[in-house]
Amino acid sequence: MPSPALNKADFTALSEFRYQMRRFERFSENAAQAEGITPLQYLLLLHIKGFQGRDWATVGELAERLQAQQHGVVALLTRCETAGLVQRKTSATDRRRVEVHLLPAGETVLSRLAAVHRAELQSLNGVFVIPNLAPQA
């Protein structure tokens, strides 16, 4: 059964949502660059720190969170290691697994960036609400 046609209000809501999302993304890009890291490096640090249940993540888990190929994440990790932001460690419980941990410099940069991102999200005051689209039948 085909979905009902979208109306003008649906397109307006979707457009506004995508606009606000892009504005926040641009803010995030600029904030990361002001700290001397790339936006992807910021996201990598955030996903390590924010990984549920532990203070590290695997390369595969980070690839999923970043929606990237593992080989690309490995290259990103190498750049972050060179910058002194993260460290890869072989797991003590499974020698096949590589854990990615934040280093103190990574924690410091991430804390500053997370604080400005939280403030920016609070200033948006509910902009990121799912658009009120016409229900599907």
Image (cartoon, rainbow, N blue to C red):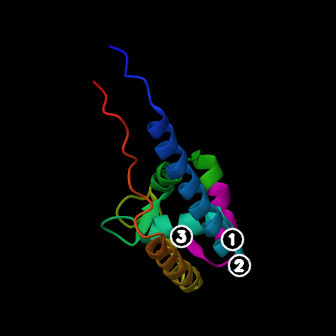
| Lower position in the chain sequence, tag 2 or tag 3 | 2
The quadrant the N terminus occupies is: top left
x then y, percent, for residue 58: 46, 58
Is 88 within the magenta? Answer: yes
Measured Cα–Cα span from mark 2 to mark 3: 16 Å
Q: Viewer-proximal residue, 1 or 86? A: 1
Disc 1 target residue: 30
> Residue 77's image quarter?
bottom right
Task: Find the magenta span and give its range.
Answer: 74-90
Q: Would you say the residues marked 1 and 2 are in contact, meaning their CB atoms lie under 8 Å apart?
A: yes
Q: Which residue type does callout 3 highlight?
A: Leu
Q: Is residue 60 above or below residue 104?
A: above
Q: Is residue 110 left or right of residue 125?
A: right
x then y, percent, for residue 9: 45, 39
Residue lying at 45% horizontally and 54% vertically, measured from the top left = 61
Residue 77 visible in this rendered orientation of the protein:
no
Q: Is residue 5 above or below residue 106?
A: above
Residue lying at 65% horizontally and 79% vertically, measured from the top left = 84
